[in-house]
């Protein structure tokens, strides 16, 4: 998952899984955590396919980006620095 990372100029890292692979939610969350350890990364989003035709997004932040707001806008929830959502039929 981490190999696919793209980093925006504002320090937000976005990574994604393969379309043809199912990922365990813990693996996706761990990848989001790991991306925060990279220099210059303020927030991370990892998007991957889960079971039951779901797409999971795990989001993490060091505090300067409120990932909770992003995930809530997509129907999920969490906290300022740790949030997630699941999208069905995407």
Image: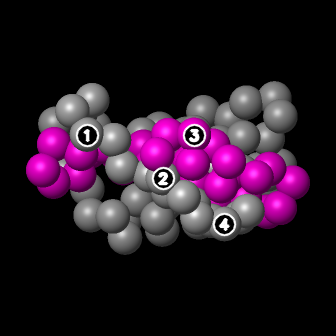
**Residue beneath label 4, please?**
79
Check disc 1: other Cα within 10 Å, few if <14, some if 14-19, many if 20+. few
Find out whether the residues at labels 1 and 3 contact each other: C-beta distance under 8 Å: no
Q: Helix, strand, or loop for circle 2?
A: loop
User: Magenta includes 86?
Assistant: no
Question: Could you tell me which residue is drawn at 41 percent across and 59 percent down?
Answer: 28
Which residue is at the far left? 52
**Residue 28's disc number:** none
**Residue beneath label 3, please?**
73
* Separation of marks 1 and 2 at Cα, in angstroms: 12 Å
Which residue is at the far right? 64
Question: Could you tell me which residue is drawn at 15 percent across and 54 percent down?
Answer: 51
Rendered location of residue 29, percent (x, y): 46, 64
Question: Could you tell me which residue is drawn at 48 percent across and 68 percent down?
Answer: 30
**Residue 88's disc number:** 1
Rendered location of residue 1, percent (x, y): 41, 49
Check disc 2: other Cα within 10 Å, few if <14, some if 14-19, many if 20+. some
Rendered location of residue 36, percent (x, y): 69, 60
Q: Helix, strand, or loop for circle 3?
A: helix
Residue 81 visible, this orientation: yes
* Separation of marks 2 and 3 at Cα, in angstroms: 7 Å
* Separation of marks 3 and 4 at Cα, in angstroms: 13 Å
Check disc 3: other Cα within 10 Å, few if <14, some if 14-19, many if 20+. few
Q: Helix, strand, or loop for circle 4?
A: strand
**Residue beneath label 2, please?**
76
Position of residue 53 relative to residue 83, above or below, is: above
Find out whether the residues at labels 1 and 2 contact each other: C-beta distance under 8 Å: no
Write down the region rendered in magenta.
Answer: 46-75
């Amino acid at each position: 998952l981490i190999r696919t990372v793209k980093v925006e100029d504002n320090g937000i890292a976005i990574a994604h899984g393969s379309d043809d692979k199912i990922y365990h939610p813990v693996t996706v969350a761990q990848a989001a955590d790991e991306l925060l350890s990279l220099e210059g990364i303020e927030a991370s989003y990892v998007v991957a396919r889960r079971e039951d035709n779901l797409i999971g997004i795990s989001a993490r932040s060091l505090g300067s980006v409120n990932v909770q707001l992003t995930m809530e806008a997509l129907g999920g929830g969490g906290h300022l620095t740790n949030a997630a959502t699941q999208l069905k039929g995407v």
